[in-house]
Amino acid sequence: CRLIETVPRTVRKRCRRDFRMTVAHAPHSWEFLARAVEVGGEEGLSALGRSKETLQAYRERKHEILSAFDTLADHVRVNLLGMPSEQGNGPGKKKADTSKMNGTKKMIYMINDFPYFVEPGIEHGIVWSTGKLCVDEMLALLEEQLPGKEKLYFINPPSLQSIAEVEHAHVFSRDQPAGCKLVL
């Protein structure tokens, strides 16, 4: 995403930060999302938030995951990216055994279990990867998974990443508005 101008104050006022995550009080429109992605960086992307209910569900699920895994990253690597697991750092806990990947790269697209608060008709997904994200590879995957859809994508800056140890990008998609041509 390219940094071209700052997010207007009205954009920043729509949400409030809550323990490193933003609570959105109204669903984000496609235009709002496009503007935040266009601005990029912490300035633009920190304006994106989840509903209070989704944020609460996230916290509850995070607690469950951390009772079974050393980290959220271990959960993603084992359960989503298919890495083998090994004994973790506590009784009954697991961690990903990254030594057995042998440099193999895997990339998947999935619907976000805890999406940003978006208007109906907009889908929030995530591309997870065992290696560095390559834009060309990611766009090929997205075209395969979301053919003909209009897409916005970004990688949060480190200060906004909830699972910084695993490469991932956020993807918003929607059906093409009538009379529009798809441009990636």
Image (cartoon, grey):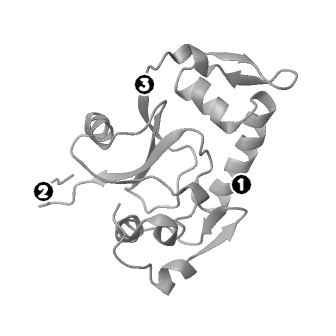
Q: Answer whether labels 3 and 2 touch (C-beta < 8 Å).
A: no
Local crowd size for mark 3, using a 10 Å CA cut-off: few (<14), some (14–19), many (≥20): few
Question: Label 3 is placed on what type of residue?
Answer: Lys
Q: Quadrant of residue 154?
A: bottom left
Dot in front, 3 or 2? 3
Who comes first in sequence, dot 1 or dot 3? Answer: 1
Name the mark on residue 56: 1
Element assignment for label 3: loop
Question: Label 2 is placed on what type of residue?
Answer: Lys
Who comes first in sequence, dot 2 or dot 1? Answer: 1
Q: How many numbered marks does the figure carry?
A: 3
The residue sitting at 31% across, 35% down in the picture is 141
Name the mark on residue 181: 2
Q: Which residue is mark 3?
A: 105
Q: Answer whether labels 2 and 1 touch (C-beta < 8 Å).
A: no
Q: Quadrant of residue 73?
A: top right
Is 88 in front, or is 50?
88
Is 144 in front, or is 167?
167
Instruction: For marks 2 and 1, give the CA distance.
Output: 38 Å
State left or right for residue 16 relative to residue 180: right
Local crowd size for mark 1, using a 10 Å CA cut-off: few (<14), some (14–19), many (≥20): few
State left or right for residue 158 relative to residue 30: right
Which residue extends farthest right?
Answer: 91
Quadrant of the image for the N terminus?
Answer: bottom left
**Residue 128: image x %, image y %?**
47, 36
**Residue 14: image x %, image y %?**
55, 78
The residue sitting at 48% across, 79% down in the picture is 11
Who comes first in sequence, dot 3 or dot 2? Answer: 3
Question: Label 1 is placed on what type of residue?
Answer: Gln
**Residue 48: image x %, image y %?**
52, 65
| Rendered view: 121 above or below 68 | below
